Amino acid sequence: MSYQLPDASEKAQYVEQKFTEIAPKYDLFNDIITAGMHRYWKRFMVRQTGISKDAVCLDLCCGTGDIVYRLGETAPQGRMVALDFSQGMLEIVRQRNVSGSNRLLLLRSDANQLPFATGVFDAVTIGYGLRNVSHLVDCLKEIERVLVPGGALVSLDVGKVRIPWLFEISQFYFFHIVPRLGKLLYPGQDMFDYLPHSSIDYPDQERLKRMMLSVGFKQVDIFDFFLGASTVHVAYKH
């Protein structure tokens, strides 16, 4: 039987539950399917924020904390917020915070309704998270709202390979190989079917750029990796 995505009313609960279930081996899964390249892409993301040593940053859909800890290293005098819908993912971040740094706030919340005042963050990062929000435009509006003027949103996510025959190869890998690799770690786990299927209606690089501009960002730069299979958008607030 073919996999069916959860409908809009069930998506938030489904994503929270499934990411909590795979949290303990999520980093290993990403290492396997990207041959470790996701770590380079995340370092690249943090460089693109252009933050100062005392910056205030928000990492949305923070997962296991890969990005927020890199932000903290870049801004050693700054303050970081790691926000995720999944309690299991936040628990991994908490376990990694062995020093008990009071510069890091962990928060379980919805990326579509950010519990922050307007204009408080120098940078907002989100890795493989925009595909999972219930309302993409609303999420982008919220991110733009909480950024300071001149602040940057940096998003890493799947993109669309632009060369047709390579696109077919990338789709075969994403839809057939990736789920099998994931199920070696968690047999029977359908979250690994969700991940490729969630990319079907997710906007390609140029469409996502237009959406970011439509909610008020003044400039959006695109950086493709693996010929566009993974992509970074850097959007700057007026």
Image (cartoon, rainbow, N blue to C red):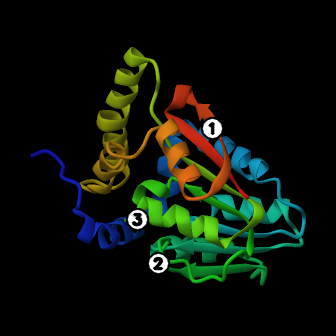
| Residue for badge 3 | 19
| Residue at x 33% of width, y 56% of height | 186
Circle 2 residue: 87
Q: Nearer the viewer, residue 227 or 182?
A: 227
* Amino acid type shown at disc 1: Ile
Q: Point out residue 28 in the picture as x, y percentages from the top left corner.
A: 51, 51
Q: In the rendered view, does 113 fall on the left or right side of 156?
A: left
Ranked by sequence position, the earlier of labels 1 and 3 is: 3
Report the front residue among 104 and 184: 104
Q: Residue visible at 50% across and 45% down?
A: 208
At mark 2, the secondary structure is: helix
Residues 22 and 217: in front is 217
Q: CA distance from mark 1 to mark 3?
A: 27 Å
Label 1 secondary element: strand
> Would you say 112 lies left or right of 222 here?
left
The span from disc 2 to disc 1 (Cα, nearest Å) is: 31 Å
The amino acid type of the residue labelled 2 equals Gln
Eye-nearest disc, 2 or 1: 1
